[in-house]
Amino acid sequence: MNDMRLTINGQDRSLAGVAPHTRLLDALRDAGLTGAKEGCAEGECGACAVLVARPDGAERTRWTAVNACLPAAAAFEGQEIVTAEGLGTAPGPRGPGQLHPVQQEMATRGGSQCGYCTPGFVCAMAAEYYRPDRAGAQEDSDTPSAQRAEQTGTGAVGEEHAPDHECGPNGFDLHALSGNLCRCTGYRPIRDAAYALGTPEETDLLRRRQEQPAPAPRSTRLSSDGAHFIRPESLTELFEHMARHPGARIVAGATDVGVEVNIRHVRPGTVLAVDRLAELRGLMVSRDSVEIGAGLSLSEVERALGHRVPLLDQLFPQFASRLIRNAATFGGNLGTGSPIGDSAPVLLALGASLVLASAAGEREVSLDEYYTGYRESVRRPEEIIRAVRIPLPVANTAAFHKIAKRRFDDISSVSAAIALQVDDATVTGARIGLGGVAATPLRAREVEDVLVGQPWTHDAARAAALLMARQGTPIDDMRASSRYRSAMLEQVMLKFWAQSQPTGIQEVQS
């Protein structure tokens, strides 16, 4: 089938003739919807953001912002998409042709100058506007949030919100915009617009749409000029296609593959989409472990876990941006084998294992035995990563430190996840995962051995820090020098000790 159909801005649209490698962004622009734009083509600027209807449980829909420049248009066959143009037409509570509340606040507060990035900001902001659990204007139900924003001065966070300076008085999480870049306004007017938003009106059609189930995934087969895009209906069918198409590219969120297509002009002969396979989308918590389906987006995992694994809570805000996390998966991040992927060090520290599945059955492999070389692993050609298993209980003292040139939405220069079990002031267990210092993510086993059985003191941390600086074989590259990487490993251990003390951050002795 080459006559692909999907719902765009409330209307059924045909994207006949779309090729397997045509990006969603290009398909939208070819259809005359030019609000979404290409900036970086890597998922870092957010100019291409659109809203997609995703499941929020079995009976509801969550409007989710994603980058349109990375995934193939074929991945959205049968799905619902809203662009910036759609926000200002029929879905608006005020009728066709009226500005959506997000657009209105952006205009009122001067959140747009050149306008290139604005449609992406508007879509990302709208996803947060419709977030079901967004805390509305709770402090004073008689005062609209927009009015309170005026009273507090350009929507600044009041003292009552001091513990979380990234959250506005209306419950708007500013991290929802972490994947959107603007070069003109300086961000403050955009923040003001976000903090001035109230709650969606009862008549808002997009709000009402959330009360219905999201579209079910459709089996998709798109072929053109020898290239194929296939979305199988089941894991069994996936394995059949893998046997029929050796070397097929397995794609979930396309946050890595999409960059290769855009920047390196890679064109896989066959793409097998697995992000909506039911067998890869489970999350089970038992007394002994947490099992996370490899096809769940990181945002879905974050919501479903509900703070059961604190070390993952530290990972999520530092993993790219919300736009990326809305599509990226653990299966994809681990499957690429990148030595600077952010999830591997954390999962190594958690003692995670991978469930590898094929037509012949399943096997479980410890993550610290999974990688064999640069982007190489023990996974066989006929296998996929089905799930990640994390043993419970988790260590009681843990942290993830990511060293990068930007605080958010950046690639690590070096990263370290440290998980210690400290009982009666003594280290009784240790697992440390490192990234960016070798051809593969690795465990700092020497450091672990030095710590176990020792009192958790500054002297023990100092000895571990000196040994930590000698881990791996760091190199000089565009992100950092080998000397810098080693120095950061040493400092990470010292910082970890300081922050683990009961009184918080302590002054570390030289």
Image (cartoon, grey):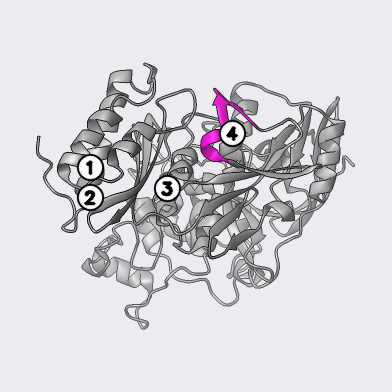
Q: Is there any visible trace of residue 67 in the rendered image?
A: no
Residue 82, by quadrant, is bottom right
Residue 316: x and y, percent?
A: 45, 49
Q: Nearer the viewer, mark 4 or mark 2?
A: 2
- Residue 315: mark: 3
Quadrant occupied by the N terminus: top right
Q: Is residue 369 left or right of residue 449?
A: right
- Residue 329: mark: none
Note whether 123 is above or below 230 in the view shown. Answer: below
Three-letter code, disc 4: Asp
Q: Nearer the viewer, mark 1 or mark 3?
A: 1
Residue 175: x and y, percent?
A: 41, 52
Proximity of marks 2 and 1: CB atoms separated by less than 8 Å: yes
- Which class describes the residues within 10 Å of circle 1: few (<14), some (14-19), or many (20+)? some
- Which class describes the residues within 10 Å of circle 3: few (<14), some (14-19), or many (20+)? many
Write the residue at 64% across / 30% down: 378
Q: Nearer the viewer, mark 3 or mark 2?
A: 2
Q: Which of pointers 4 and 1 lies earlier in the amino acid sequence?
A: 4
Residue 446: x and y, percent?
A: 35, 32
Write the residue at 57% across / 77% down: 202
Give the residue pinned by disc 4.
Answer: 256
Q: Which of pointers 1 and 3 lies earlier in the amino acid sequence?
A: 3
Q: Secondary structure at mark 1?
A: helix
Three-letter code, disc 3: Leu
